[in-house]
Image (tube, helix red, strand yellow):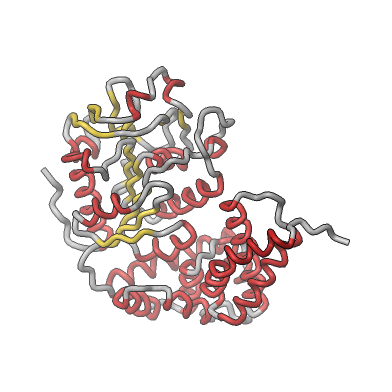
Amino acid sequence: MRALVLESMDLDAVITTHRQPIERHLRRRLGDPGLAEDLAQEVFLRAWQHAPRDLPETRMRAWLFRVAGNIAIDALRARRPTDDTVVLDGIAEAVGTAVDDPHERLAIDAALAQLSARDRALVTLQFAGYGPTDAAALLGTTPDAARKRMNRARDRFRLAYTDRRVVDAPLVLIIARDDAPQTYIDWLLAGGVRVRHVDAEHAARQLATADALVLTGGHHDLHPSIYGQEQRAAQNPDLDVDRADAAVLREALALRMPVVGICRGHQLLNVVRGGSLHQDLSECGVAAGDHGAGDHVIGTREDTLARRVLGRTTSVPSFHHQAIDRLGRGLSVASRTDDGVIEAIEDPRLPFAVGVQWHAETPDAHEAGRRLRDALVEAAHRHAGNAAVPLAA
């Protein structure tokens, strides 16, 4: 007889904590509340039988959501129509009702109506959070073929959506982990954009209709394993969180969407391009206290976006004990401090992909923070198809 891993009291606590989020997750994917409720029971049955003992709360949540995703794929595959060009109506309905802004929902519906049935199905799968591997299983093809088809469908949707929506202000997404997002939200709102705080789980649909992405700082360092190192001085890393955020960032970069990474987000931009980090500033001979609080001066390199936006030198606030070591592929160093720490990076091949080690969102950033925000807003307007907004002098 199979040994049961979770004790009954543990299972009761898991169900009480996670039932509603798991059921909402399944409803979004399946579009069927009754089926979602039934399958949620299957999720918790598998937890009772197979979940590892003594998982921390965050890892138990991730484990349950992975199981729920696999169960949803099995359910959708079982009811998959013989003609894969048929739109998955249940998912489409779930996507539509998940949009809070009625104008955005109308624009999405109108854009989807302009696509072929196959493209509608593929875009709808992305809205529901499915990736190429999931789509391949649902559509009976290979992951590589599914990825190419999804990318083409996404590009066609974006063109149709841009034509159909009425844009009063670009939409900027924020993925914030540990830092309270309100400071970032206020910073962006002052630039005249719409702001939406999302998590990585829901970012697939959000990226399809957004105009820029901001990844914030945090109190959890990136897990060293994602840049090929053993953990030495990294503080409180969470590998599952880092992988989820990295996937969102890669997707945004593939869309050529304007991106700003701040502190941890800056480091993540470097890592997803194959770069590495100093796990502590002492590894490069710099005292962490010099960057742990207060302002310091940075200098920008000639012929960079940073020089155009920030000027030759500026004073910025920073709070970090890590820094970029090996630079990622395709990235350029845009600014450094006097002690050699890389304070800004950018990808000159993309319209706007910038990482800053300093905290542009804080009031202490003063003019430097405003200039970076205004440059992002200009790039978001361009991505939205609006007339260009003059860059701050």
Q: Residue at x 35, y 76 (%)?
A: 105
Front residue of 128 and 361: 361
User: In the picture, residue 84 is in which quadrant?
Assistant: bottom right
Find residue 300 and report its horizontal and vertical position in percent: 23, 30
Front residue of 333 and 194: 194
Find residue 359 and report its horizontal and vertical position in percent: 29, 40
Q: Which residue, as the protein is rendered here, is positioned at the far right?
A: 1
Q: Is residue 192 left or right of residue 118?
A: left
Q: Is residue 136 visible?
A: no
Q: Is residue 145 visible?
A: yes
Front residue of 115 and 101: 101
Q: Quadrant of the C terminus?
A: top left
Find residue 190 and report its horizontal and vertical position in percent: 19, 54
Q: Is residue 373 above or below residue 138?
A: above
User: In the picture, residue 346 is in which quadrant?
Assistant: top left
Front residue of 353 and 90: 90
Q: Residue at x 29, y 69 (%)?
A: 162
Find residue 144 and report its horizontal and vertical position in percent: 57, 58
